Image (cartoon, rainbow, N blue to C red):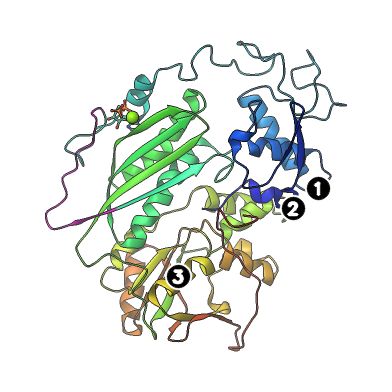
């Protein structure tokens, strides 16, 4: 998945900070635990950003102000500004406010009085995450969930984790966060052609924030209900906000769509929203980074693509027996296609003019369109290959699923990926998908 906050600060990853008299060098690979004084690396980097004159300064300040309001009293303003605690105290920028008593400073929401799990772990699970689960023999409440596989089916199982500051901003609406946490997991089942059955939820929460939990549960369960799946268990702990879901799906033996089945001569396809294209989530991120300026409606449209992806489960089921290989697009088309080519031992050509581009992205410069569509990340569309003879059946499966599909290229014997323009001439582009551990990710 697309890292949201750290790329914002890529040019600044060598920032220096003073922490309790110790000089700490900040790099993206630095473990958060090394930053003491109750501050995460993301907060520290945002604080540094807020002090720069860069374009992202305004957004960093907004983000920090939200964080300061919602959780503690970290002063985010330069020392020449009034202090963050409604003028009761002044303190150095970035220093934890000394006025953060149990009741919290004026203007800030009250902080939890005792344990960060004030409601109680089990009450919380009962109130927000326990619902009837006809899909399970035994659901939430025992040491294990019990699932009975349908006779003759195989389990398809996948996990995806969303980490605050890495995959989402603290300003995202909790309903959308709940939706996205499950959607990215269902997208993996879709890419395997598996039918979703149930899911588990492992949750780390900095505090019990009931409006947040109610919103999160609402987003989660409305998508779960749309797919007829149940939450059958999980784990809950105090800690930095982190949402890890594991999904369980079923697929007949031998029918799972895998990455290793592409053959030379197969057509290369990608799904897309009926009235949209690839790359909108990346365009939204660029807008949040301050690199692109979008009108309010356009920003809302691409923001929805970023925060509420629609997993292509029905299409994945329809492609069983048709597609020779498939993957879902989470890290960018070029990078994800690379996994299919590598696992299948083949190459591919892509016609750039065939890429599906939505109306908002289409108004950006051509280079930006290609960057977002080919290396954007967070699309959660399906990229798949199929023999040319399956073309009509593929289109019928997409129509039945209510999704667009576009043929964007061909699988080749020769290894490597070649990008061609409308005239069939090679185009050289500097593109990169997302790798969370790559230098500068
Ligand atoms: P144990 O200590 O045996 O691991 P827990 O006390 O952690 O069990 O959890 C009690 C029950 O609540 C278990 O059935 C577990 O699956 C379920 N559970 C815990 N957290 C969640 C959650 N966030 N969502 C759904 N079920 C949960
Ligand atoms: Mg447990």
| Of pointers 1 and 3, the one earlier in the residue sequence | 1
Q: Toward which corner of the image does residue 364 lie, by quadrant? A: bottom right
Q: Is residue 45 left or right of residue 115?
A: right
**Residue found 28% across the figure and 58% down from its top:** 194
Q: Is mark 3 within 8 Å of ligand 1?
A: no
Q: Which numbered dot is residue 11? A: 2
Which residue is label 1 attached to?
54
According to the picture, the residue beneath numbered tag 3 turns out to be: 270
Depth check, front residue: 35 or 174: 35
Specify the principal SS of the magenta part: loop
Give the extent of the magenta segment.
141-156
Q: Given this view, does label 2 or label 3 mark the residue nearer the observer?
A: 2
Q: Give the mark nearer the N terminus: 2 vs 3.
A: 2
In the displayed structure, does residue 3 sit left or right of residue 51? Answer: left
Report the Cα–Cα distance between label 1 and label 2.
Answer: 10 Å
Instruction: Give the position of the C terminus as an image quadrant.
Output: bottom right
């Amino acid at each position: 998945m697309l890292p949201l906050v750290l790329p914002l600060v890529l040019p600044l990853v060598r920032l220096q900070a003073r922490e309790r008299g110790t000089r700490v060098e900040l790099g993206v690979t630095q473990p958060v635990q090394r930053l003491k004084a109750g501050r995460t690396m993301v907060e520290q980097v945002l604080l540094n950003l807020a002090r720069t004159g860069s374009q992202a300064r305004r957004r960093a300040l907004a983000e920090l102000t939200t964080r300061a309001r919602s959780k503690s009293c970290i002063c985010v303003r330069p020392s020449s500004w009034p202090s963050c605690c409604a003028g009761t105290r002044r303190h150095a920028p970035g220093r934890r406010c000394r006025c953060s008593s149990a009741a919290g400073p004026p203007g800030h929401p009250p902080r939890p009085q005792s344990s960060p799990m004030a409601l109680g772990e089990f009450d919380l699970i009962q109130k927000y995450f326990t619902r009837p689960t006809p899909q399970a023999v035994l659901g939430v409440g025992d040491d294990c969930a019990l699932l009975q596989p349908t006779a003759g089916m195989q389990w398809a199982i996948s996990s995806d984790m969303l980490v605050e500051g890495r995959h989402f901003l603290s300003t995202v609406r909790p309903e959308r966060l709940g939706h996205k946490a499950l959607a990215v997991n269902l997208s993996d089942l879709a890419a395997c052609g598996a039918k979703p059955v149930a899911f588990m939820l492992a949750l780390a929460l900095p505090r019990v924030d009931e409006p947040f939990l109610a919103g999160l549960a609402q987003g989660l369960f409305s998508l779960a209900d749309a797919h007829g799946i149940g939450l059958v268990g999980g784990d809950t702990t105090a800690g930095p906000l982190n949402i890890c879901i594991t999904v369980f799906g079923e697929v007949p033996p031998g029918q799972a769509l895998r990455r290793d089945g592409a053959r030379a001569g197969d057509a290369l396809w990608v799904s897309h929203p009926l009235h949209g294209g690839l790359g909108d989530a990346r365009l939204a991120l660029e807008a949040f980074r301050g690199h692109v300026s979008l009108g309010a409606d356009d920003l809302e449209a691409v923001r929805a693509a970023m925060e509420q992806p629609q997993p292509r489960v029905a299409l994945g089921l329809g492609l069983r027996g048709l597609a020779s290989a498939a993957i879902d697009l989470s890290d960018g088309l070029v990078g994800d296609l690379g996994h299919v080519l590598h696992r299948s031992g083949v190459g591919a050509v892509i016609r750039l003019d065939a890429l599906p581009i939505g109306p908002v992205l289409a108004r950006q410069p051509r280079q930006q369109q290609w960057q977002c569509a080919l290396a954007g990340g967070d699309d959660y569309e399906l990229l798949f290959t199929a023999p040319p003879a399956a073309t009509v059946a593929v289109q019928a499966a997409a129509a039945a699923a209510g999704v667009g599909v576009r043929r964007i290229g061909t699988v080749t014997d020769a290894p490597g990926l070649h990008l061609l323009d409308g005239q069939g001439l090679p185009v050289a582009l500097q593109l990169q998908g997302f790798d969370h551990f790559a230098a500068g990710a």
